[in-house]
Image (spheres, helix red, strand yellow):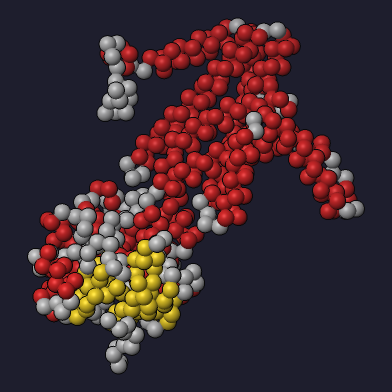
Amino acid sequence: MPPESESPAGAPFVLEARGVTKRFGAVTAVDALSLGILAGQVTAILGPSGSGKSTLLRCLNFLETPDAGEVRFEGTPIRARDRELDRLRARVGMVFQQFNLFPHLRVWENVALAPRVVRGVPRAAARGRALELLARVGLADKAEAHPSHLSGGQQQRAAIARALAMDPAALLFDEPTSALDPELTGEVLAVMRSLATEGRTMVVVTHEVGFARAVAHEVVFMDAGRVVERGAPAQVIDAPTQERTRRFFAASGRG
Amino acid sequence: MIGPDGHLSPGRLGRMARAPWWLLALGLAVTLFTWKAATSEVYAQILRRLLSGLGVTLAVTAVAFPLAIGLGLLAALGLVSPHPARRNLAMLYVQVARGVPILVQIFIVAFVVVHLGVEALHWAGGSWAAVAGLRDSDVPMVARVVAALVFAYGAFEAETLRGGLTSLSRGQAEAARALGLSQRQALVRVLLPQTFRRVLPTLGNDLISLLKDSSLVSVLGVRDITQEARLYASATFNFTESFTLLALFYLALTLLLALGVKALEGRYRQHAA
């Protein structure tokens, strides 16, 4: 598959990986991979464990520093450890598999922290906005609680509210439901679905094939650090052209 | 067997052994000596001497501990730094400070470092009057001892804080950085508050150790409670009374600190995660 480095006319990529490579010792987790994320689109990245999905996602906001290649945010190349990087991170939200809420802060303080610290929003305003966002994810009544008193699903919804608090240009989801049981998975996916309906730009690394089919505009199937196949969900999931893709979705029962 | 409350579960002694009788024993001892002090002139004299040294003991501890935590924090950040030079420097400090007895460190700081420092100032300051007139003896003994205790305890705090920092999940730093917080902001707003909550019990122990080690100031003649007891004892030969009461003073102080730390721990335990 040739690297796609040109965006379609009039639709600039919000985030773009160009030939990104990331190695861990002798293992090449992401192999000269190129991928552009269009504004307002939901991109689902699927693939077997160890295919480099999460590493790719983490390269997009430099939680991993790529060994080669380039990441662009709104057209500007980002280099590790400079101003551009802080700007990128402040404007690209991330939701983690393990939620990673800050346990020493109340739920609303988790949501209000970055606006207050990074943007200097006054406490009262940041709190007001945090309460709005918590209501948005159905956690209005948990604002004063500490994260340890929340269920996994509630914690993940609070983490989504935290990511939304910076008014992100794009949201990265790193297997957001993999640590949750099916019942809790549903409430998190519902929130993500409603964000997609709002036209949020989202990149979702997931094993939820059903969610990808229903919500994603584009599905990217990865294996061994490369993109094997990409396209509309119906095409990649239900009528894959590559043998590797076909085997994966056959084994997963096509969600 | 460790019980669900984290205590060793009692054997046959049952509830009698579980009752906090050690507290009762201490209380009795304190009461006994208070009564003694009220009725015996010797004890009353010792008590007055100890009270006159109490300020020094408490001040040395209260000044040295926060400074040691500050130094320890710097060293801990060095120990976990990705920069090899900082890591090596921090390691050098910790090894030196932990490998030399505190008493010896006090001698070195008080008589070697201070001397060299004054010499260096003379050399750097030239004929400038304020510097040229400076003598070793212008540096108070209590300041030298505090500096030495800070140097020694900074290494303990460095290890404690490094342990606390590295025990946090990587996800905490990642979540903070992913939100756009700078490294410093992530440290101050996310990592350190959690670290301090986690290491609170260890810090409490270190504070108690420091309070006890503050008795070392007496070797330089600084008049803390230990020095007062020594002076009184050697002048009056009332060794038994002096040193028993001195020990009890330290016990009472460390007990108060332990209870304080425990209260603080209870407050933070819930959300230390």
Quadrant in the picture for residue A205: bottom left
Question: Residue B19 location, x and y as percent?
Answer: 33, 16
Viewport quadrant of the C terminus of chain B: top left
The extreme bottom residue here reads A9
Between A69 and B233, the residue placed more toward the observer is A69
Q: Is residue B178 left or right of residue A83?
A: left
Q: Is residue A149 left or right of residue B116?
A: left
Picture layout, residue B198 above or below residue A197: above
Between B257 and B74, the residue placed more toward the observer is B74
Picture layout, residue B48 above or below residue A252: above
Question: Residue B211 location, x and y as percent?
Answer: 57, 29
Callout count:
0
Asked if residue A194 shows in the view, the reply is no
Quadrant in the picture for residue B104: top right
Picture layout, residue B25 above or below residue B68: above
Residue at x 39% of width, y 68% of height: A22
Picture layout, residue B47 above or below residue A19: above
Residue at x 19% of width, y 80% of height: A231
Residue at x 36% of width, y 44% of height: B272
Q: Is residue B142 left or right of residue B32?
A: right
Between B223 and B177, the residue placed more toward the observer is B177
Question: Residue A199 location, x and y as percent?
Answer: 22, 78
Question: Residue B125 location, x and y as percent?
Answer: 84, 53
Residue at x 67% of width, y 29% of height: B103
Asked if residue A146 shows in the view, the reply is yes
Viewport quadrant of the N terminus of chain B: top left
